[in-house]
Image (cartoon, rainbow, N blue to C red):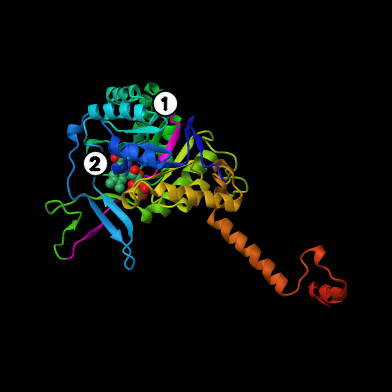
Amino acid sequence: MADLSVMVDGLKLKNPFVIGSGPPGTNANVIKKAFDEGWGAVIAKTVSLDASKVVNVAPRYARMRAAETREVIGWENIELISDRPFEVWEKEFRQLKQERPEGVLIASIMEEYRKEAWVELVERCQACGVDAFELNFSCPHGLPERKMGAAMGQAPDILQEVCGWVNEAASVPVWAKMTPNITHICEPARAALVAGCEGIAAINTILSVMGVNLETLRPEPTVEGYTVPGGYSCKAVRPIALRMVMELATMMYGGGLGSEIGQAGEGEFPDRSLSGIGGVETGKDAAQFILLGASTVQVCTGVMIHGYKMVRDMCAELSEFMDSHGFKTIEDFRGQSLQYFTTHAALVQRQKEVKAAEKAAKAGLVTEDAAWEGDKFVEQSDKLVANDD
Ligand SMILES: Cc1cc2nc3c(=O)[nH]c(=O)nc-3n(C[C@H](O)[C@H](O)[C@H](O)COP(=O)(O)O)c2cc1C
């Protein structure tokens, strides 16, 4: 039976499944439910010092469904960070650590570009006993207008400075959560790691417009006739998330043995952690993020569709996958598929070699000494002759 537990940045999780910051971690009540169902850790909904500046609208979600099955495959939201007063959160963090002391509780935090604000937020959360921090540098809507969230995540210099403030004040592990709304995700991630963050989490939602209502001509979700671009999540974003996690892992850990990216064993941050996020709903989805270097896998929208109990099926499926390959621990296969990424030129070269070998085999040409046969010896010799003058 496979061992699903992971040790990450000194935190022991009973399995790699983590509730991603969002509605599934929006108050103590639901966080308790997540722990009771067996999630490896919970990242609470992002908090800031002054919730009065956070005003949500409704509707704030829009969904994309598969044409035939009606299954939800894409989800847009224009939801902000938590609108609950920070004092309430302090009480609930303390209560959670008292009532579920074994549950790994991670505070997601976000503030304006002011050192005192970040330091105060870190110190007050820490005093409540949270086990780690995730820095939200990635919310794509609403907050960037206040130079928060993705606006910081898209400016590596600012991000590095803010991570420096946080790391100075934090005595527990710190993960920086990246925005995918950027050309090269490794640049802000490198800045966070240089500033001392223990880990990177990726990805947050992808900036999107779900669609335009062809009767009203209004884009959706429509709030009093208008909208803003929102964040896209769920199954549809998984391929993009896997690509970004692969790029981050290659930068952090190297390309893996046999890789032709030329980074085998040359990762820039081999001892930092990576948490994969985006469209995870099954154990097999999780296995793919782990194969690309993640040691934990977060789920947000999936929980909004399937409920907290989905973690049981995900554990069973991940365990089955591990058994079928003989992997005993998560570390046994983490990052194992990174070695199969290469350059396009190298793909062309490989294909040329395979085709040349196939052609030679078809023509009955001997290409290796072991292929000589006693009763075809003369025929095989003849085929290797270039000119017969
Ligand atoms: C409704 C909603 C609210 C979210 N709120 C937050 C948030 O407060 N902080 C944060 O860091 N990410 C937030 N996210 C982003 C998720 O944590 C996650 O990064 C993203 O949705 C991709 O993962 P998924 O496909 O599993 O949802 C939110 C996502 C959704 C759908």
Residue sitting farthest toward the left: 224
Pick whichever, 317 or 388, lies toward us.
317
The residue carrying pointer 1 sits among few (fewer than 14), some (14 to 19) or many (20 or more) residues within 10 Å by Cα, namely some
State the extent of the magenta-drawn residues as a range.
196-214
Quadrant of the rendered image containing residue 197: top left
Q: Residue at x 45, y 46 (%)?
A: 245
Residue drawn where x is 40% and y is 25% of the image: 167
Which amino acid is tagged 2? Leu
CB at disc 2 and ligand 1 closer than 8 Å:
yes
Question: Magenta stretch containing residue 50, yes or no?
Answer: no
Please tell me whether residue 199 belongs to the stretch shown in magenta: yes
Asked if residue 181 can be seen in this view, the reply is: no
Q: Is residue 78 visible?
A: yes
Residue at 65 percent of width and 63 percent of height = 353
Residue 113 found in image quarter: top left
For badge 1, the amino acid type reads: Val
The numbered disc on residue 80 is 2
User: Which quadrant of the figure shows ligand 1?
Assistant: top left
Where residue 70 appears, x then y in whole percent? 31, 64
- Residue highlighted by disc 1: 172
Of residues 345 and 3, the one drawn nearer to the viewer in this rendering: 3
Residue 259 - label: none
Other residues around mark 2 within 10 Å, as few (<14) / some (14–19) / many (≥20): some
Q: What kind of element bears circle 1? A: loop
| Residue 23 location (% of width, % of height) | 28, 43
Q: Is residue 149 left or right of residue 54?
A: right
